[in-house]
Image (cartoon, rainbow, N blue to C red):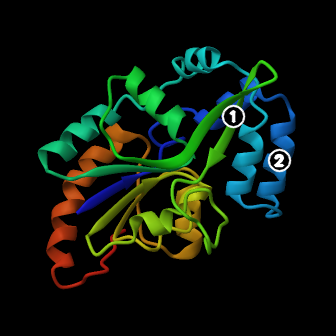
């Protein structure tokens, strides 16, 4: 069994990328965001254009990232998964550097992370940031920087945890979905079975209750999903 989990708004309290852009990118990033929400550009292009707007030194960026919070129940969730030998991979259409820095600030490291890769160069005496997808995303239906459907593609029983738009396309391609916020609405509208949750303290007892039933039925129904 594999557990895949979104980061921004799921593990993190705030959307880390939006918070960074609000602090360091001026208002132009919101114009680009509107183009994405209107379906005029994919999320990958949106993120690349937005990240290029950041005006901050690496030290300034780090100090700001260190102020961002994660769900206080996430550490207990990880402990449960480790005890049950359930590997957890973070799959995010956000930024790998932001995720690693925030998790390290909260004493969490060593988790596999698939996210857009941040690079930094110096031009005209200032640091310039660029973003690249971690794997080729040609053919991604949502135009994402990280094609989550490709990441979760495996023969193992797959659990997915998420909250928002970047989780929509993957939610019908896994065996069990834990959803909150916008992902709940999408699952309802699309007829996708899910288990709703508010935070990881709420999710954990639900996972403990549901997983044995999923595993039993998965022996005979390889694509089983539960509501």
Residue sitting at x 51%, y 18%? 66
- The reply, left or right, for residue 85 in relation to residue 97 is left
- Please rate how many residues cluster around mark 1, counting C-alpha atoms within 10 Å: few if below 14, some from 14 to 19, many from 20: many
In the displayed structure, 136 sits above or below 65; it is: below
In the rendered structure, the answer to whether residue 94 lies left or right of residue 37 reads: left
Residue 122 position (above or below residue 49)? above
Residue 178, image x, y percentages: 40, 57
Quarter of the image holding residue 83? top left
In x, y percent, where is residue 24? 74, 24
User: In terms of depth relative to the viewer, which is nearer, 119 or 225?
Assistant: 119
Image: 5 above or below 177:
above
Q: Residue furthest bottom?
A: 220
Q: Relative to 68, say whether 35 is above or below.
A: below
The residue that disc 2 covers is 32
Q: Quadrant of the N terminus?
A: bottom left
Is tag 2's residue or tag 1's residue first in the polypeptide sequence?
2
Q: Nearer the viewer, mark 2 or mark 1?
A: 1
Which residue corresponds to the image point at 57% horizontal and 14% vertical from the top-left?
A: 63
Q: Element at badge 2?
A: helix
Quadrant housing the C terminus: bottom left
Q: Residue at x 57, y 33 (%)?
A: 14
Q: Residue 216's spot in the image, x, y percent?
A: 14, 73
Instruction: Count the labels in the image.
Output: 2
Find out whether the residues at labels 2 and 1 contact each other: C-beta distance under 8 Å: no
Residue behind mark 1: 129
Q: Residue at x 67, y 31 (%)?
A: 121
Measure the C-alpha gap from mark 2 to mark 1.
17 Å
Q: Is residue 214 left or right of residue 158?
A: left
Element at label 1: strand
């Amino acid at each position: 069994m594999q557990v895949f989990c979104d980061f921004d708004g799921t593990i993190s309290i705030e959307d880390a990328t939006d918070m960074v852009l609000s602090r360091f990118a001026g208002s132009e990033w919101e114009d680009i965001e509107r183009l994405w929400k209107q379906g005029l550009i994919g999320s990958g292009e949106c993120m690349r254009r937005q990240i290029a707007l950041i005006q901050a030194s690496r030290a300034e960026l780090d100090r700001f990232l260190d102020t961002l919070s994660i769900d206080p129940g996430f550490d207990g969730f990880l402990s449960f998964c480790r005890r049950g030998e359930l590997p957890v991979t973070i799959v995010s259409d956000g930024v790998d550097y932001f995720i690693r820095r925030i998790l390290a600030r909260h004493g969490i490291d060593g988790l596999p992370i698939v996210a857009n890769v941040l690079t930094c160069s110096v031009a005209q005496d200032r640091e310039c940031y660029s973003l690249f997808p971690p794997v080729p995303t040609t053919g991604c239906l949502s135009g994402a920087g990280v094609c989550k459907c490709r990441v979760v593609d495996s023969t193992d029983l797959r659990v997915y945890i998420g909250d928002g738009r970047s989780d929509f396309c993957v939610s019908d391609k896994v065996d069990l979905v834990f959803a909150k916020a916008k992902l709940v609405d999408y699952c309802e509208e699309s007829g996708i079975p899910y288990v709703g949750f508010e935070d990881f303290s709420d999710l954990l007892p639900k996972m403990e209750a549901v997983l044995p039933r999923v595993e039993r039925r998965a022996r005979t129904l390889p694509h089983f999903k539960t509501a």
